[in-house]
Amino acid sequence: MASFPSTFPVMLMISTLMLGSLILSAFASNLYQDFDITWGDGRAKILNSGELLTLSLDKTSGSGFQSKNEYLFGKIDMQLKLVPGNSAGTVTAYYLSSKGSTWDEIDFEFLGNLSGDPYIIHTNVFSQGKGNKEQQFYLWFDPTADFHTYSILWNPQRIIFSVDGTPIREFKNLESIGVPFPKNQAMRIYSSLWNADDWATRGGLVKTDWTQAPFTASYRNFNANACVWSSGVSSCSSSSPSSASTSNAWLSQELDSTSQDRLKWVQKNYMIYNYCTDTKRFPQGLPLECTKS
């Protein structure tokens, strides 16, 4: 198994370019305050005085929750512990999404597998209702044994997916060459645990083993440094850059050279699907963003 060179720092370095803003921060927040359970008929629970949230799936139903707030840009962190054991056929989805027929969306989906086989992290970006930008990865650890931090950094220049501070994917704003980028629609955070055994594991060949139910995924330590969108107004303002502070560094954060090396390490060793190399899928030519390094 590949390992990080000892020179790699633990945390992403933050760009020194910052925009002044009023940022909502929720550190290790009370999940009662941040989320509403939206479906599952009691299968989703907030426990330990708001410190822990669990979603469960059985043969009758899955379950899900959504954030009380909508966000227009932010750095969103959540710790997840995925369904252990034989999780084949199950999908744990954790994503940002707007509403409507031309919605924007930023996806983490965790595709279950047979005991001992690796989970697959499925990522995608939708803009104006169009996605088809999938990248998939294995992980370099067992995501069912403990909690790990899954992060989405979304600012006007880029989207960065990270796991425990290690970037696994960057989607840049390339509107300059005609690639849509999600920047005008506020999004809520959603998560759900559901049965997708028609496609989730080996293309649907492996079905959910209901004798293992209920299946449970756990969440804790939500953190949002983000612009909250309410009644058409953002809590952030970029009108006073002179008042920049470290709390809003994410608004202009980018990958430094060390983080770019870590991204390349992940993509070399753990990426198992990249739409940008799937020439059979795009016989008329790869998407525009795939031509940019």
Image (tube, rainbow, N blue to C red):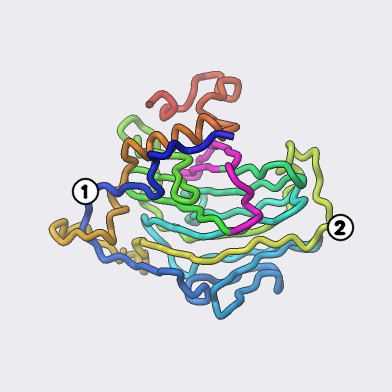
Tag 1, which secondary structure?
loop
Pointer 1 or 2: first along the chain: 1
Mark 2: amino acid: Thr
As measured in the structure, the alpha-carbon distance from the residue carrying label 1 to the one carrying label 2 is: 53 Å
Query: Are there few (<14), some (14-19), or many (20+) residues within 10 Å of tag 1?
Result: some
* Quadrant assignment for the N terminus: top right
Q: Is residue 283 shown above or below 172?
A: above
Q: Disc 1 designates what residue?
A: 17
Mark 1: amino acid: Leu
Q: Is residue 119 shown above or below 191?
A: above
Instruction: Compare residues 117 and 135 and report the one nearer the observer.
Output: 117
Q: Are marks 1 and 2 in contact (CB under 8 Å)?
A: no
In magenta stretch: residue 145: yes
Q: Which mark is residue 175?
A: none
Residue 148 x/y as whole percent? 54, 55
Q: Report the span colored magenta.
A: 123-146
Residue 165 x/y as whole percent? 44, 49
Instruction: Give the residue at x 56% y 19%.
Output: 283
The answer to which quarter of the image holds residue 41 is: bottom right
Instruction: Compare residues 128 and 250 and report the one nearer the observer.
Output: 250
Q: Is residue 87 shown above or below 178?
A: below
In magenta stretch: residue 210: no
Left or right: residue 99 compared with residue 186: right
Tag 2, which secondary structure?
helix
Instruction: Compare residues 233 and 216 and report the one nearer the observer.
Output: 216
Residue 52 x/y as whole percent? 58, 71
Instruction: Give the residue at x 71% y 70%.
Output: 43
Q: Which mark is residue 211?
A: 2
Instruction: Compare residues 153 and 4 and report the one nearer the observer.
Output: 4
